[in-house]
Image: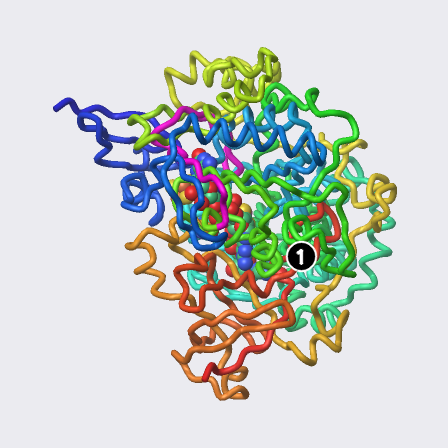
């Protein structure tokens, strides 16, 4: 049988966006590997995606359209044809739109695939033309992205590959060895040349174990640490006055502000010893090039936007941006000049269409505010169309989400690769292709390569890609605009059609030839060496008029977690433990949490807690415990651990509810509260109590 290799791209929500080489024998994929000569992928895939074939050929793949026969939540279905499924969906959506208005239809999607086409193109056009409610996709990154944007102007930071030139690497709220593993070889290269790695995290995670120094910080207090660092740098005159003068705005005001954050006070707030704060500040000012890698952990708290904003000021104060490997990095996605308007066609949105925040799905589906219990939406949501996401498992305040999904009068459609926690509540389930079965192109948020994913095999069963699904539905709905006839290749060409220096010399033809192309940016790329920030002033904005206009503090400040002793003492006395639920090493959000080999490596849902907290509660290692607050509860196995301090517990996530003994997961306890900016989710701003389960 013929053996051939195909160029693919890992589609998952991960900064690494790996280049994959798929080997196909006859009509079956037999091997998936990291592309050897790719500069960032470097020939290896992570533990999850190296088992991608276990996902593609999983015996539980959803292969045919299904209609619900049992009660909602039971997950009992009968197979129907695509024609029946599409007709039923079109008929019901038309009917619901007519009776309640098209805004009563809510699309719900996130990053099941990050491919530009299947993440958001035909689907967006479809829902825009339909006049459905818009979805604010806030569940992951908007708090930090917003804070970063106010300060620096866009999603751009130091060149990840240039981290090899850094002398000091500070990692905050990021578990590189789990969630950004392809950065690690570059970090090791720096270390070989003498660089020091410091990890600042409330949890001594894998990355912290591998670092040179670990600093335990109280959850949600990074902004206070950033302010103290800037205070010390300014007081000791360790800042780069030339860079500050030329390329920053508001230094005098910043100077005044940070005086409020002396090390004594910040030591109290963060739980970090004063001497460590002082040493860190001096090192960050003087051991250039200094690379600060922040990721998402630190922004899943009430003040997450301010935390990122405050940290983002530091490299401009120290002048770190001048050096290869110096600066801060949250995301590289802003480097890609993608034509989003062509992809999504916002011009099709009826004016005045409302927007619903995905981080408050429970509120949207129950039409009940989590704050005062009042109805929020007119018209209420009557139809929910889920794809690229598993909200029953991943959305906060699961009790509210499930209550909503149980509604008999809610018409729910789920397009999925598997029978997930969410499909259990669907009226119609539709089978989706995996990355090996469809075409796509990719940008990245952890490097600068534009990439092409070619289909390696035919769709399995009757699986259909997202673009094909929404193309077919547009026909059924009678949408006649030309954009609904665009082929995948045409959409891909539109996506990369913008004239921009970073795209000079890059065409779809070249992408087809080369499969992966580094953007036309310098190598290494030093985006802010000479200032040129993307803010309105072109400077790094220590003081931001835009923030003032948005009703925010225009200067960096510390906003404590909403569920903390400081802000809610009564709640804290009942629920004194902050529960973090960061990604489990072998899962990707809830993806892969149904692959037997990967479940085996995670064993079972656990919660790590400190010996002191355990002893006070008569909890011993291995015991089943109840983790709870006023929102809900989940049963987990206790692991007594010196990787967390008293008052912090960690439950690696995201397990499927139905694969857990009590049929629940950690999102029973998380809240619908949103961040200070960007309206993001606050998964880690979560107080709980833990007790033995008898
Ligand atoms: N293996 C794997 N990789 C993944 C994912 C996955 O599920 N599994 N998910 C992907 C996605 S969608 C995302 S968004 C990223 C997420 O991955 P990361 O950006 O790495 O973020 P988290 O894992 O949420 O948190 C990382 C660390 O932040 C810490 N943290 C929590 N609160 C705070 C705080 O207040 N301050 C500080 N300094 N640290 C804090 C946590 O203890 C954790 O160790 O990873 C992506 N990659
Ligand atoms: N407690 C807690 N909760 C969290 C987090 C946390 O740290 N703690 N992290 C949050 C974060 S950062 C994120 S990003 C969200 C992630 O939440 P989600 O975006 O829901 O991510 P996944 O759980 O990976 O689910 C993606 C689903 O999309 C499906 N899928 C994949 N490819 C395709 C496709 O081509 N077409 C269709 N139709 N479906 C496809 C997959 O099978 C999978 O079930 O979870 C959030 N929830
Ligand atoms: S999940 Fe991340 S590290 Fe793993 S293969 Fe995909 S892009 Fe690479
Ligand atoms: Mo995420």
User: In the rendered image, is residue 487 in sight?
Assistant: yes
User: In the rendered image, is residue 179 in sight?
Assistant: no
Residue 692 within the magenta-colored segment of the rendering: no
Q: From the top left corner, tell me how far across and down residue 42 is, in percent.
A: 35, 37
Which residue is rendered at x = 28% and y = 54% of the image?
A: 597
Q: Quadrant of the N terminus?
A: top left
Dot 1 alpha-carbon crowd within 10 angstroms: few under 14, some 14 to 19, many 20 or more: many
Residue, disc 1: 672
Is residue 47 depicted above or below 430 in this figure? below
Q: Secondary structure at mark 1?
A: loop
Q: From the top left corner, tell me how far across and down residue 300 is, in percent.
A: 63, 55
Q: Quadrant of residue 58?
A: top left
Magenta stretch, residue numbers: 425-451
Q: Quadrant of residue 416?
A: top left
Which residue is rendered at x = 83% and y = 63% of the image?
A: 260
Q: Quadrant of the C terminus?
A: bottom left
Answer with left or right where residue 539 lies relative to residue 656: right
Residue 445 within the magenta-colored segment of the rendering: yes
């Amino acid at each position: 049988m013929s053996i051939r290799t195909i160029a693919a791209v890992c589609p998952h929500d991960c900064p690494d966006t790996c280049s994959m080489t798929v080997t196909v024998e006859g009509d079956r994929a037999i091997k998936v590997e990291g592309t050897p000569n790719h500069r960032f992928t470097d020939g290896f895939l992570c533990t999850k995606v190296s088992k991608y074939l276990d996902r593609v050929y999983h015996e539980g793949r959803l292969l045919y359209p299904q209609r619900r026969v049992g009660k909602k939540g039971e997950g009992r279905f009968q197979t129907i044809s695509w024609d029946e499924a599409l007709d039923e969906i079109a008929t019901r959506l038309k009917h619901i739109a007519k009776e309640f208005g098209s805004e009563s239809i809510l699309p719900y999607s996130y990053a099941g695939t990050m491919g530009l086409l299947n993440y958001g193109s035909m689907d967006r056009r479809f829902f825009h033309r339909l006049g459905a409610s818009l979805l604010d996709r806030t569940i992951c990154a908007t708090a930090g992205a917003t804070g970063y944007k106010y300060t620096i102007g866009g999603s751009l930071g130091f060149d990840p590959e240039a981290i090899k030139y850094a002398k000091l690497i500070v990692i905050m709220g990021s578990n590189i060895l789990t969630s950004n593993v392809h950065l690690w070889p570059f970090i090791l290269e720096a270390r070989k040349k003498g660089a020091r790695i410091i990890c600042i995290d409330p949890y001594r995670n894998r990355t912290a174990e591998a670092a040179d120094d670990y600093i335990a910080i109280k959850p949600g207090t990074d902004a206070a640490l950033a302010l103290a660092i800037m205070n010390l740098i300014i007081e000791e005159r360790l800042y780069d006055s030339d860079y500050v003068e030329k390329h920053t705005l508001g230094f005098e005001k910043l100077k005044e502000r940070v005086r409020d954050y002396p090390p004594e006070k910040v030591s109290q707030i963060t739980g970090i010893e004063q001497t460590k704060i002082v040493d860190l500040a001096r090192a960050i000012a003087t051991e250039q090039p200094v690379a600060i890698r922040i990721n998402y952990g630190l922004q899943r708290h009430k003040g997450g936007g301010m935390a990122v904003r405050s940290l983002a000021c530091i490299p401009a104060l120290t002048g770190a941006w001048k050096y290869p490997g110096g600066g801060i990095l949250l995301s590289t996605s802003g480097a890609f000049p993608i034509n989003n308007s062509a992809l999504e066609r916002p011009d099709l949105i009826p004016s005045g269409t409302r927007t619903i925040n995905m981080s408050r799905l429970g509120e949207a589906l129950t039409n009940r505010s989590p704050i005062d219990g009042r109805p929020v939406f007119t018209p209420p949501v009557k139809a929910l169309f889920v794809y690229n996401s598993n909200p029953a498992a991943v959305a906060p305040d699961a009790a509210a989400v499930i209550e909503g999904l149980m509604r008999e009068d809610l018409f729910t459609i789920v397009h999925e690769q598997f029978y997930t926690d969410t499909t259990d509540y669907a009226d119609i389930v539709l089978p989706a292709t995996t990355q090996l079965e469809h075409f796509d192109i990719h940008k990245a948020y952890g490097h600068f390569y534009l990439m092409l994913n070619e289909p390696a095999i035919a769709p399995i069963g009757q699986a259909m890609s997202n673009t094909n699904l929404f193309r077919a539905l547009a026909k059924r709905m009678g949408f006649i605009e030309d954009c609904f006839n665009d082929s995948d290749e045409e959409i891909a060409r539109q996506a990369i059609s913008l004239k921009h220096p970073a795209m000079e010399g890059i065409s779809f033809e070249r992408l087809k030839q080369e499969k992966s192309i580094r953007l036309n940016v310098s190598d290494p790329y030093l985006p802010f060496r000479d200032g040129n920030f993307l803010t309105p002033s072109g400077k790094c904005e220590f003081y931001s008029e835009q923030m003032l206009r948005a009703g925010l503090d225009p200067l960096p400040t510390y906003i404590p977690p909403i569920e903390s002793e400081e802000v809610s003492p009564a709640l804290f006395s009942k629920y004194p433990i902050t529960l973090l639920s960061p990604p489990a090493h072998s899962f990707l959000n809830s993806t892969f949490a149904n692959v037997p080999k990967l479940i085996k490596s995670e064993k079972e849902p656990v919660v790590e807690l400190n010996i002191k907290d355990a002893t006070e509660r008569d909890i011993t290692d291995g015991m089943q415990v109840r983790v709870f607050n006023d929102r809900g509860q989940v049963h987990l196995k206790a692991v007594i651990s010196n990787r967390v301090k008293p008052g912090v517990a960690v439950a690696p996530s995201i397990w499927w509810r139905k694969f857990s003994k009590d049929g629940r997961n950690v999102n029973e306890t998380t809240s619908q509260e949103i961040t200070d900016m960007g309206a993001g989710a606050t998964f880690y701003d979560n107080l709980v109590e833990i007790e033995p389960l008898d």
